[in-house]
Image (cartoon, rainbow, N blue to C red):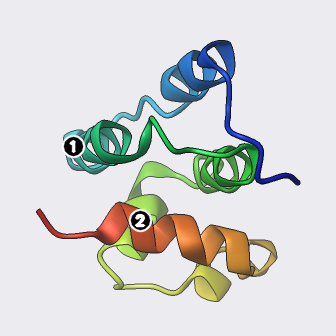
């Protein structure tokens, strides 16, 4: 993983990959991209992509801190995913 900034094509693919079935998740993710798309790194993109492997309900539960990463998928309990989750949770 690298701290190199993600390129436009990679960002576009990531945004497409992040489309969700639950409106609540889409709203959180849309806000995330509005705030961070100019500064996202490949490492952030990899971590966000890993979060997108979760079901919609698990993703929402993790985002709202109703479940921990280790409760939904122990493999996601790593520093880069925690960093992106913190970015997702930033208040308005």
Q: Residue at 53% x, 52% y: name it.
A: 55
Q: Position of residue 15 (x, y in %)?
A: 49, 26
In-front residue for pair 45/18: 45
In-front residue for pair 31/72: 31
Q: How crowded is mark 2: few (under 14 residues within 10 Å), some or many (20 or more)?
A: some
Q: Which mark is residue 27?
A: 1
Secondary structure of the residue carrying tag 1 is helix
Closest to the camera, between mark 2 and mark 1, is 2
Viewed as shown, does residue 46 lie left or right of 71?
A: right
Viewed as shown, does residue 52 lie left or right of 32?
A: right
Q: Residue at 70% x, 53% y: name it.
A: 50
Judging by the rendered image, the residue that carries numbered circle 2 is 87
Q: Position of residue 21 (x, y in %)?
A: 35, 34
Quadrant position of the C terminus in the picture: bottom left
Q: Position of residue 37 (x, y in %)?
A: 44, 36
Q: How crowded is mark 1: few (under 14 residues within 10 Å), some or many (20 or more)?
A: few
């Amino acid at each position: 993983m690298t701290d190199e900034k993600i390129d436009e094509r990679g960002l576009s693919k990531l945004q497409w990959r992040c489309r969700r079935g639950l409106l609540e998740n889409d709203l959180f993710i849309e806000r995330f991209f509005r705030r961070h798309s100019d500064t996202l790194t490949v490492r952030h993109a990899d971590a966000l992509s890993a979060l997108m492997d979760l079901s919609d309900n698990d993703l929402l539960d993790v985002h709202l801190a109703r479940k921990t990463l280790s409760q939904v998928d122990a493999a996601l309990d790593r520093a880069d995913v925690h960093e992106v989750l913190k970015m997702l949770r930033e208040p308005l």
